[in-house]
Image (spheres, grey):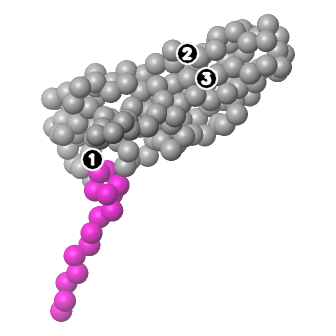
Amino acid sequence: MLLRRRRLSPLAALLAAVTCSAPAVAADVDPASLYEVTTEGTSTQVKAGEKGTFVLAIKSKAGAHVSDEAPLKLELKGSQLTPAKEKLVLADSVARKAEGQAFADPRFEVPFTAAAAGKGSLDAKLVFFICTEKLCARQQKTFSLPVEVL
């Protein structure tokens, strides 16, 4: 009888590695210490009927990077505000790799419109994988950003 070897897709191999090595890795490094997420540059005041911009950037620290093979999802919802796009993926990032650079830190810039004067907010849910040579760990962050509509 002939036996066939099954090959795992890169994503399946990544997920298997994360699942199998997670307990051992947790003792070595806290994955949350490998990056920072910032919303610096997001519009905090806009006039009713005008556009603002939601900005979210992931800044990886030395030796770490955001995986460009594992899924990255950013979901946006607005209260009194309407984002131009509610579901984003890594391909929606405005950051691009520089020549000779292996990875680019993702940066998202999403326009939003403000309906009427008052207090509004943008709620974001971000899911991504932060990786080093030894680990790849799923991360999830949520944000709620107040926006004053004039």
Tag shown at residue 41: 2
Q: Amino acid at mark 1?
A: Thr
Residue at 29%, 51% in the rendered image: 14
Quadrant showing the C terminus: top right
Residue assigned mark 1? 19
10 with respect to 115 (left or right): left
From the viewer's side, name the closer residue of 31 and 84: 84
Residue assigned mark 3? 54
Q: Amino acid at mark 3?
A: Phe
Which of the 4 quarters of the picture holds residue 96? Answer: top left
Q: Residues within 10 Å of mark 3 (few under 14, many from 20)?
A: many
Q: Distance of mark 1 from mark 3, alpha carbons?
A: 33 Å
53 with respect to 129 (left or right): right
Residue at 74%, 21% in the rendered image: 51
Q: Residues within 10 Å of mark 1 (few under 14, many from 20)?
A: few
Location of residue 130 with respect to 147 vertically, above or below: below
- Give the extent of the magenta segment: 1-15
103 with respect to 89 (left or right): left
Look at the numbered disc 1 and give the secondary structure of its residue.
Answer: helix
> From this viewpoint, is residue 23 visible?
no
- Tell me if label 2 and label 1 are in contact, CB under 8 Å: no
As drawn, the residue found furthest toward the front would be 99
Look at the numbered disc 3 and give the secondary structure of its residue.
Answer: strand
